[in-house]
Amino acid sequence: MRLLMLTPSLPYPPHQGGALRNYGLLHSLSTAGHQVTLLSFHDGSPPVQSTPLVDLCETVHTVPTPSRTSAQRLFDLITSNAPDLARRLRSSAFCASLTALLAGQMFDLVQLEGLEMAAWLPQVRAAQPRARLCYDAHNAEYALQRAIYRVDRQRPRRWPLAAYSLIQWRRIQAFERDICRRVNCVLAVSDEDAAALRPFRPDGCVHVIPNGIFVSEYARIDQTLDLGPNALVFTGKMDYRPNVDAMLWFTNAVLPQIQRAIPTARLYIVGQRPHPQLERLREKAGVFITGWVDAVQPYLQAAAVYAAPLRMGSGTRLKILEAMAAGCAVVATSAAAAGLPAAVKSALILTDDASEMTDAIVTLLGDPTRRFQLGQAALAVVKSHFDWAILLPRLLAAYEDCGIG
């Protein structure tokens, strides 16, 4: 099968959310013998030629990520009914590259990675009407925006943001419905997301292909860190709203209670592009914000407990899968564990209450044996449910069911 994959950012290095999923999909399809062409936004670092993508893909094409000012976003909000997400990656350079690729060769399948890339669907369909189209929904985006709205409306000072989220929720829902109706195949990352998207399909067919990882990569120890005996770790893209909200809530409602019981407890917030709202956390005792790191594995392997206190979001949390693959004891909220099957949730400690989360973490910090047992259970279930070796046959079966392949 000859496949064109459109991604919002280069899927290498596979450190965060979308890149992890896209790299896993691309790597798995390539090693299964399919011919993959990649077109992606990328700003030059790392150089494409220095990545494994050049060996995995037939060709790799990149264009710079377009910039978009707040004034432009406000103008679009007022003058258009399109969601902000659909306009974020408008680019004449990408349009030209896509036009050239579609004119130069025929593809059996064009896969649109995430709702941002689905905005290019009309151009693809016009150029190659016989190509099959697959929309890979990294989130049920309207459900995510709805959850953000419901959190923001509870606090009067955030009502302007709640109003914005309300507008975006309705616009995204209409856009997402249109995309799901026009493609041949829709992939969702969880049963919950699939249920949110199925009403948008005339046939009700949405295939669940969970986020996956290469589990063996998390057992390797290329670098060791000493974060202290009571290190709490959180990982993620730190300008992403649900991650920012999680850390603001956790450092206010949970961490102080933990530190009263265990003064040496430290929190490491690991991930690129920390949001300005997080800057004030640097002043808190025992809180460390790393920014970009070359690899999250050393932090996961050095963690006493992995904390995932998300209060909003959708999809399957790759951050939790990574922590489980590294053998971490994980304490998470129900929102953070959304999309995970019951067998996987059984290897986590789940609570949405600040006091209960405090008690769970304090208990684990004082019980190395229990931490080890929980971590080994987590590793076993993630290996059996979320390794790409397990997920690839499901992906190929989904394609076949949609007449692709």
Image (cartoon, rainbow, N blue to C red):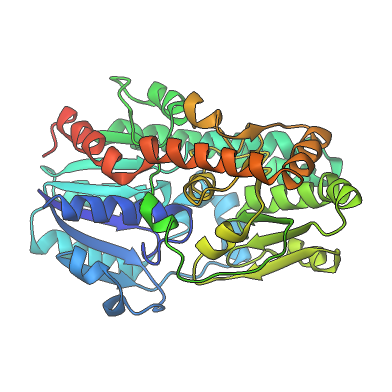
Q: Is residue 237 visible?
A: no
Q: Who is closer to the viewer here, 367 or 96?
A: 367
Q: Who is closer to the viewer here, 284 or 297?
A: 297
Q: Looking at this view, name the residue that lies furthest to the right.
A: 260
On screen, 192 above or below 324?
above
Q: Is residue 7 left or right of residue 365?
A: left
Q: Residue at x 14, y 65 (%)?
A: 58
Q: Who is closer to the viewer here, 71 or 392?
A: 392
Q: Is residue 357 left or right of residue 346?
A: right
Q: Looking at this view, name the residue that lies furthest to the front.
A: 369
Q: Is residue 54 left or right of residue 330?
A: left
Q: Who is closer to the viewer here, 8 or 282?
A: 282
Q: Residue at x 58, y 38 (%)?
A: 374
Q: Residue at x 50, y 70 (%)?
A: 67
Q: Quadrant of residue 271?
A: bottom right
Residue 367 lies, in percent from the top left, at 72, 43
On screen, 88 above or below 177?
below
Q: Is residue 169 left or right of residue 23?
A: right
Residue 167 lies, in percent from the top left, at 61, 40
Residue 21 lies, in percent from the top left, at 38, 50
Residue 24 lies, in percent from the top left, at 32, 52
On screen, 356 above or below 278?
above
Q: Is residue 116 visible?
A: yes
